[in-house]
Structures are given as C-alpha cells and as structure tokens.
Amino acid sequence: MERRWVPEGPLDVGLALQPHKRGGGDPTWRRSGDGAVWRTTRTPDGPCTLRVGVKAGCVHGQAWGPGADWALEALPGLLGAFDDTSGFVAKHDVLAEVVRKNPGLRIGRTGRVMEALVPAVLEQKVVGQEAWRAWRWLLNRYGEPAPGPAPEGMRVVPETVVWRQIPSWHWHRAGAEAVRARTIANAAWHADKLEAAATTEELDRLLRALPGIGVWTSAEVRQRALGDPDAVSVGDFHLAKLVGYALTGEKTDDPGMLRLLEPYRGHRHRATVLVWLTGLRPPARGPRMSVRDYRAF
C-alpha cells in the first residue's frame, strides 16, 4: 500500500524518525542509499514494514504486511504533523541558531507504547551499547521477519504475550539482568491498559505505578509513543551536563537542568532535542562508564 502526503511547512524525515533508532544495527530501523528510512512496527492490526521517502516536498510512504493500512494512516503523526510548536520561543542564542538551521525538526508519535517501553527499560542505568546489544539479541531471537521487500535482517518486535514468556536464561543471554527482565515482563501484563492511555498525563501515571519504571523511563516512552514535547528525561546520565554546558558553559545536575529549562515549560523536551543538535559537549574528564557483559556474570 502507498500514501503520498504533503506536510505543511518544512519537514526533516530523518530527524523525525531518528529517536526510534536504537543504536547501530537496530533490526527495526534502516536507512537505504537513496535516503529513505525503513522502519518496522507492530500495529493493532499486525506487523508492518514502512518505507518513508521524500521528493520535491512530498512524503512518499509505502507499507507491507497486515498493519500496512494502520501504519499509513498514522504516517503524518509519526512525522510530527500534530506537533504543536506554538508558544515555543528559543530564549538562548545557541538554541535559536539550531532552530534556524533545522526548520524541519518535528516531534512525532508512534502510538505504540510497548515498542518504546522495552528498549527504554533495557537502557536503564547502562551504557547504550550494552542496551542495544540486548535489543538486537531479543529481536533476532523473538521478533519475526519484516514483511515485504525490507532490507535484509530487519525484524518486527514480538507480540506482547511473547515478552511475558521469555525464559530467564534467554534474558541472561541477551545481557539483561533479572530486574530489567521482570520490569518488561510485568509491563507486558498491563500492555492493553498502557496502549489505551489517551493522554500523556494518564500514561505517565500508569507507567510510574509499575515496579521498575520511574521518571526517566516514563519520559522516554511518552516522547516517542505520544510525541510529548515537555517530557524531560530527568535522571539521564548525560542530559543535565549537556544542557548546562550548552546554555551556560558549565555542567549542572538535574535540579539545575530543570531550572534552566523552566522558561521552556510545555516544550522542555523540545529544548533538550535542540541542545543535542548544538553538538556542544563538555570536555571529557575521567574514564567513561564501561560496557558490561552481563552474560559472563
């Protein structure tokens, strides 16, 4: 199935879809040589492969699989068509410059909570490489091949019931310890309620009522599933330092970051995305957090 859609104003498809890529080699995300982005998803109607390209300002979406119709219907939202930027003003020159250079930045929404929740939990309190390795292992073992002419190796996330049934030794082989495994399996029991949440406030309440899910994980999920422009990833290992350095020239902590972002309330996540795009990073001092291999424990 195909759909052509002309967005209102500039749109950067790569920036809109980048947050859904979980490291290099993510089995659910590819970029082909022609610049098109391939993405798999499990819709309420079933698995789907989606290809998104842009030509002369027109978005061309192609989809395969039982969920193709659902995915194409949701395509504008995925690319940020409902991202309301009214009220946002870049109050720092460095952010205003990023806005000028990236007029097509939009915060999209997938509408799929578990797809955002599982990798977010895997990323809790570990370096990205460790979490992405576990994500790849689980998708290759329990996901299903992407429908249609998808690039080789692409997989679709498993059904919710599968997350509840993965044995402990396979979590171990993936490199995820028991705490994160239990958090994902328990959330899967409540997936229907989570997927049905109508607002970001409701989803935040439901998520944080589950063991093992706190402020950071909830924000990471709501940013991607519902396109929440104000969900700040408080507790992130790097974010507060980056925000402080970009806006003041000095690193700060979470309370300091929230004070700096207060003028952007309603768009605080948007402001942190702009901070990432500045490319400004504080000087590295001391060793980096090492990549563990839980499989050897």
Image (spheres, rainbow, N blue to C red):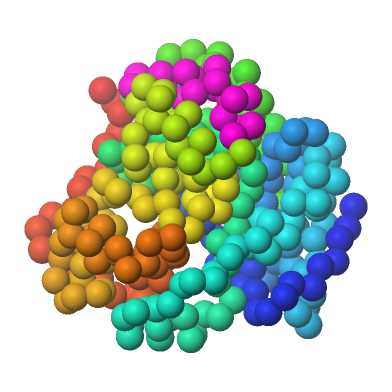
Instruction: Using the rendered image of the protein, determine whether residue 172 is visible from the camera's viewpoint.
Output: no
Q: Residue furthest front?
A: 87
Q: Which residues are magenta?
A: 178-197
Vertical relation: 206 (above or below) 182: below
Of 26 and 281, nearer the camera is: 281
Q: Is residue 182 magenta?
A: yes
Of 212 and 179, nearer the camera is: 212
Quarter occupied by residue 3: bottom right
Q: Residue furthest right?
A: 1
Percent x, y for residue 13? 64, 68
Percent x, y for residue 81? 68, 64
Q: Is residue 93 left or right of residue 274?
A: left
Percent x, y for residue 242? 26, 65
Quarter occupied by residue 37: bottom right
Vertical relation: 128 (above or below) 61: above
Instruction: Using the rendered image of the protein, determine whether residue 107 is visible from the camera's viewpoint.
Output: yes
What's the residue at 62%, 18% (across, down)? 161
Percent x, y for residue 234? 30, 48
